[in-house]
């Protein structure tokens, strides 16, 4: 059985390349993230193929945000696919609507708090209330969990503080921004190692480029799995 604490982000251009990557990773990896970039490249068809024909688990990263009725309808439609995690923005009305849409299915709703690419200046530009970004992340996480989110997406730096929230008991924390020691950071700034993220309270880590850009993706994934096994 693969260690499904590792979720591999399939951020390649299309479903054909994604399937080639999953073939290379074979039974080492059981859980994949499909994002917005794959929508026009056959993302939902890819999700179907990976679940139905290869027995994989799928995290669909759509970061939905809209009026409640639209979010509910979108999530109801998506809940008919065999997906395990779906992201929405963590605004309480969005989370509540997503949970309504997912009712009767096993789809878990994960809330995004504040995108890790945003700093205080970006929040000012977006007219978001004053305050330290880390505090706002915690406040948004608490509200999203109160509204019924099954879990939150968090940077490894935020994971421990979110794990300590009473609202987070029994809920999931999923962390991108994970880099094995020595790996290229890319555009990620606030990173942790795979074992460090798990120790901070993450249930799953999402890793993309360190695996799919590697000359030997299976070896890169195995090194991360070995690190998790020792965590
Ligand atoms: O290649 P890398 O390991 O940085 O990929 C991380 C994945 O997690 C990407 O699909 C990226 O879009 C996603 N992500 C992130 N940071 C967030 C939310 C999602 O890196 N705050």
Image (spheres, rainbow, N blue to C red):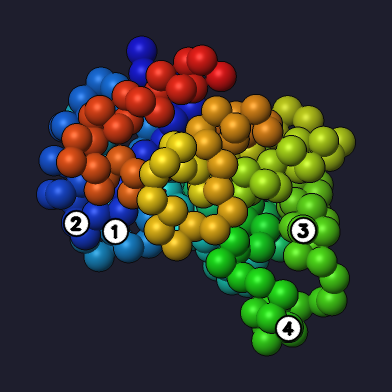
Ligand 1 within 8 angstroms of badge 3 C-beta = no
Question: In terms of image quadrants, where is residue 39?
Answer: bottom left
Is label 2 or label 4 in front? 4
Q: Earlier in the sequence, mark 3 or mark 4?
A: 4
Q: Residue furthest front?
A: 182
Q: Earlier in the sequence, mark 3 or mark 1?
A: 1
Q: Earlier in the sequence, mark 2 or mark 3?
A: 2
**Pointers 1 and 2 in contact (C-beta within 8 Å):** yes
Mark 4 → mark 1, Cα distance in angstroms: 31 Å
Q: Earlier in the sequence, mark 2 or mark 4?
A: 2
Measured as percent of width and height from the top left, residue 101 is found at 57, 51
Q: SS at mark 1? A: helix
The residue indicated by pointer 1 is: 38
Query: What residue is rendered at 86% in x and 36% in y?
Result: 166
Sort mark 1 into few (<14), some (14-19) or many (20+) by Cα contacts within 10 Å: some
The residue indicated by pointer 3 is: 134
The residue indicated by pointer 4 is: 124
Please determine whether, in this image, residue 155 is positioned above or below residue 90.
above
Sort mark 3 into few (<14), some (14-19) or many (20+) by Cα contacts within 10 Å: some
Measured as percent of width and height from the top left, residue 36 is found at 37, 62
Q: SS at mark 4? A: helix
């Amino acid at each position: 059985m693969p260690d499904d604490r590792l979720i591999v982000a399939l951020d390649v251009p299309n479903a054909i390349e994604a399937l080639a990557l999953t073939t290379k990773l074979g039974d080492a990896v059981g859980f994949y993230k499909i994002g917005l970039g794959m929508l026009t490249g056959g993302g939902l068809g890819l999700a179907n193929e990976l679940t139905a024909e290869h027995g994989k688990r799928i995290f669909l990263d759509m970061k939905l945000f809209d009026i409640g009725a639209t979010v509910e309808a979108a999530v109801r439609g998506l809940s008919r696919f065999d997906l395990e995690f779906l992201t929405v923005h963590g605004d309480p009305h969005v989370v509540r609507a997503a949970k309504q849409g997912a009712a009767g299915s096993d789809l878990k709703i994960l809330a995004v708090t504040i995108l890790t690419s945003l700093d205080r200046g970006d929040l000012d530009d977006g007219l978001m209330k004053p305050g330290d970004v880390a505090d706002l992340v915690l406040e948004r996480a608490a509200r999203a969990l109160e509204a019924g989110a099954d879990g939150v997406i968090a940077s490894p730096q935020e994971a421990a503080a979110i794990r300590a929230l009473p609202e987070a008991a029994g809920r999931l924390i999923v962390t991108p921004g994970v880099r094995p020691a020595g790996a290229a950071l890319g555009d990620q700034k606030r990173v942790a190692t795979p074992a460090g993220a798990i120790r901070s309270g993450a249930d799953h880590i999402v890793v993309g480029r360190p695996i799919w850009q590697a000359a030997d993706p299976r070896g890169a994934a195995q090194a991360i799995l070995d690190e998790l096994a020792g965590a």
